[in-house]
Image (spheres, rainbow, N blue to C red):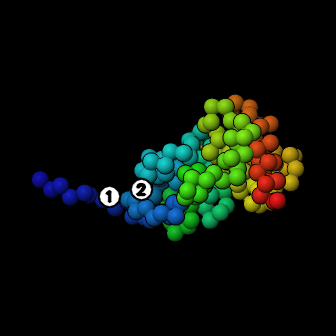
Amino acid sequence: MNDQVTISPTTLSIHLTINGREHALDIEPRVTLLDALRDRLHLTGTKKGCDQGQCGACTVHVDGQRVLACLTLAAQVEGRAITTIEGLAGEDGTLNAVQAAFLEQDAFQCGYCTPGQIMSAVACIREGHAGSDEEIREYMAGNLCRCGAYPHIVAAVRQAAQELRS
Ligand code: FES
Ligand code: FES
């Protein structure tokens, strides 16, 4: 019996750089970044909500910009720097200012939307779009929270933005 792994002609061999570590993957071209992260690499901090670009639960960073992992093909981001919620804290475990602010402001209930909210908030602050509560609401509008924790989320983003400015 031939026990060699058969790779289909439609399988791609790619390398993804995630949170500073390189991962080799054999995947079909249609596999999304979200499914590659969750199902193949077991990085389940990135959540699958709608799987169609509507909720923001799957937000990650690619080269520092926020993207929806459910609308991004894994093969599209080969060679780019991908950051997920698992890569946000320092190597010694020190929380990112936004993570710490979410805890302090009690900015979650069930927590399902939280990784996506935090990834968006980090980008929102970095983009300079956290100057007021209105601006925070506008630039965080792509991240839905079924629990309605919005006032606490805005407070957390405001706090982190102030801390990072000072
Ligand atoms: S799971 Fe990607 S936007 Fe909802
Ligand atoms: S905290 Fe439950 S969906 Fe946002």
Which element is circle 1 on? loop
Looking at the image, which residue is at 66% across and 53% down? 96
What distance separates the C-alpha of mark 1 from that of mark 2? 9 Å
Name the outermost residue toward the bottom: 79
Residue 150 vs 158, above or below: the answer is above
The three-letter code of the residue at mark 1 reads: Ser
Dividing the picture into quarters, in which one does residue 24 lie? bottom left
The three-letter code of the residue at mark 2 reads: Glu
Position of 121 with respect to 34 (left or right) is right
- Res 120 visible: no
Q: Which disc, if any, is residue 88?
A: none
Residue 159 vs 62, above or below: the answer is above
The C terminus, quarter of image: bottom right
| Residue 23 x %, y % | 43, 61
Looking at the image, which residue is at 52% across and 64% down? 20
Which element is circle 2 on? loop
Q: Earlier in the sequence, mark 1 or mark 2?
A: 1
Residue identifier under label 1? 8
| Residue 63 x %, y % | 62, 65
Q: Which disc, if any, is residue 28?
A: 2
Residue 62 vs 114, above or below: the answer is below
The answer to whether the residues at label 1 and label 2 have Cβ atoms under 8 Å apart is yes
Looking at the image, which residue is at 47% across and 52% down? 36
Q: Relative to the observer, which residue lies in front, 111 or 89?
A: 89
